Amino acid sequence: MLRTKTCGELRRDNVGESVTLAGWVDAVRDHSGILFINLRDRYGLTQIVFSHGINTEQLNLVRSLHPEDVVQVAGVVQLRPDGIVNKKIATGEIEIQADQIVVLNRTQVVPFQPSSPELPSEEVRLKYRYLDLRRPAMQKTLGLRHRITKVMRDYFDELNFVEIETPVLGKSTPEGARDYLVPSRVSQGEFYALPQSPQLYKQILMIAGYDRYFQIARCFRDEDLRADRQPEFTQMDLEMSFVEMDDIIETINGLMVRLMRDVLGRELKTPVPQMSYDEAMERFGHDAPDLRFGMELIDLTDIAAGVDFRVFREAALMEGGKGRVRAINAKGAAEKYSRKDIDGLNSWVIEQFGAKGVAWFKVDAEGKLASPIAKNFSEDQLRKIAERLDAKPGDFLLFSADTFGTTCKVLNGLRRRLAAELGLIDADEMNFCWIVRFPMFDWDEEEKRWVAMHHPFTAPLKTDLSYIDNAPEKIRAEAYDLVLNGFEIGGGTIRIHDSQIQSRVFDLLGLSIETAKSQFGFLLDALQFGAPPHGGIALGLDRLVMLFAGLDNIRDCIAFPKTTKASDLMTGAPSNVAKKQLDELAIKINKENK
């Protein structure tokens, strides 16, 4: 070994020991001819001292060093002199009195210093990812990721789960996001698809009798990216047989208790609270609500139906009861938002959500609602609105009048934005909840057909199965999402294990028997050979790590992430390939479309 100790493990108890360290030069300092090196590896940082007792050649070698040079240092551990203990680092009580240094490798001038508190742009960080990964913050996050997966594996092993790998090269299926396709050289003109999830395979495993399966699975989706989404991602995948929804929820609650305790050193009270999808949309406008603050959505449609303000009245009287007038109350925020700020919120709502805009009132010192639109309301109507919103002097009221879906998007967006701007979010809080009883189907206006809200293998609630032929919009699914701080970190369903019910669902989705057999034939066949009742869930590992680490960008939780254009700036992927490779695959590039 080129080292006997790491740069993060030496303490007062090691004083007097002869040690050898190796790592990267973090900084070099010259104090009146006495030279100091801060030596860094992923375990920490140690101060090295080179005094006049060392030969001139070695001192000159130290003076020639630059940050990020790789060196090996030998010496004796000693206490730092009184008054210069560094309490900010774990090795701050000691230093190494060096008697030898060897340069293992020189560095070119680095585009940024990994230990610097000032970071370059994300583009630079991703291009030089090997430097970015040297940053202590990145090393801490990836260490946290390792710890989370270790705890997961131990937990499921204790519960008699078996970890089974499923194929990466599989069959393309039509549901979900776009597939990443892989051309076959052997069967030219045909393609594999990279898995968006191990969904079909894990159901097959249940039919095969492996009643408790899990996997840390790599998945791929060719979709538009954002801060919490990547084209290739990792999920903790789980499936269980002979269970109901509550059994899976209880299993994952236990996992969250273990992760919170073993990873963060905090206790999570169980059971984790549950909320129906309908309640979440009514109260928060989103199926992954952030419960760390209030500012819940309040419905005012009944009051709005009788006002003279046309925007409110028309929404309240929209045909088929599709319109709503709803609002949020930002307590005590009236003075914090000027007319210019409100105009900015209005423009943001229009651009972000395609809404018509946002109406507002401020509550004055006498408790009255003040706004340019106040003249369109009677005193009694203003009083009822104030009572409904629990409006007090200094409050700031924001309204959306539109379809139910649009009011959800607008007020959820405003709720989250205002909470961040007003400092209402406790960054240390970890607020879990389950969202249950989702609608099973959603109407696709463009294709004029029903689509599965989760996936076509989701089981309907037994009490709702009678609606499948005449009122599919009423069918609720045995589906459940786990939410943490306003992010969905996991989602699952009880699966259909009856082939007849599966066929009826395919019919409703517009999938013919021939199409269903072509795309899912192996699963449909398997369901006829003694399929047990089963269900599962997948937790987004990348997103879970992001939240446990207190970060807001999923790329900081992945060693080698892609950009928002799905490219790897470090390697240059995706890239062109040789014509010979394309010929072997019988692929011709259409240059007009390139």
Image (cartoon, rainbow, N blue to C red):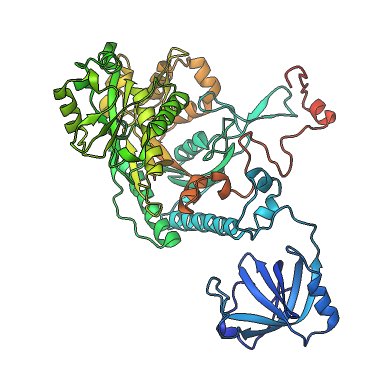
Is 173 left or right of 487, judged from the image as shown? Answer: right
Point 67% across, 81% down: residue: 96
Q: Quadrant of the C terminus?
A: top right
Q: Quadrant of the N terminus?
A: bottom right
Q: Nearer the viewer, residue 159 or 277?
A: 277
Q: Nearer the viewer, residue 348 or 78?
A: 348
Point 52% across, 57% down: residue: 144
Is 276 left or right of 68, judged from the image as shown? Answer: left
Give the percent coordinates (x, y) of residue 404: 32, 22
Residue 192, picture quadrant: top right
Give the percent coordinates (x, y) of residue 157: 46, 56
Residue 107, picture quadrant: bottom right
- In the image, is residue 538 above or below residue 328? below
- In the image, is residue 26 above or below residue 349? below
Give the percent coordinates (x, y) of residue 232: 59, 39
Point 66% across, 53% down: residue: 132
Is 361 left or right of 576, judged from the image as shown? Answer: left
Give the percent coordinates (x, y) of residue 348: 45, 29
Q: Nearer the viewer, residue 565 or 505?
A: 565
Query: Does residue 244 appear anywhere in the picture?
Result: no
- In the image, is residue 368 above or below residue 510? below
Residue 44, picture quadrant: bottom right
Q: Nearer the viewer, residue 476 or 513?
A: 476
The number of numbered badges drawn on the structure is 0
The single residue placed furthest to the left in the displayed view is: 380
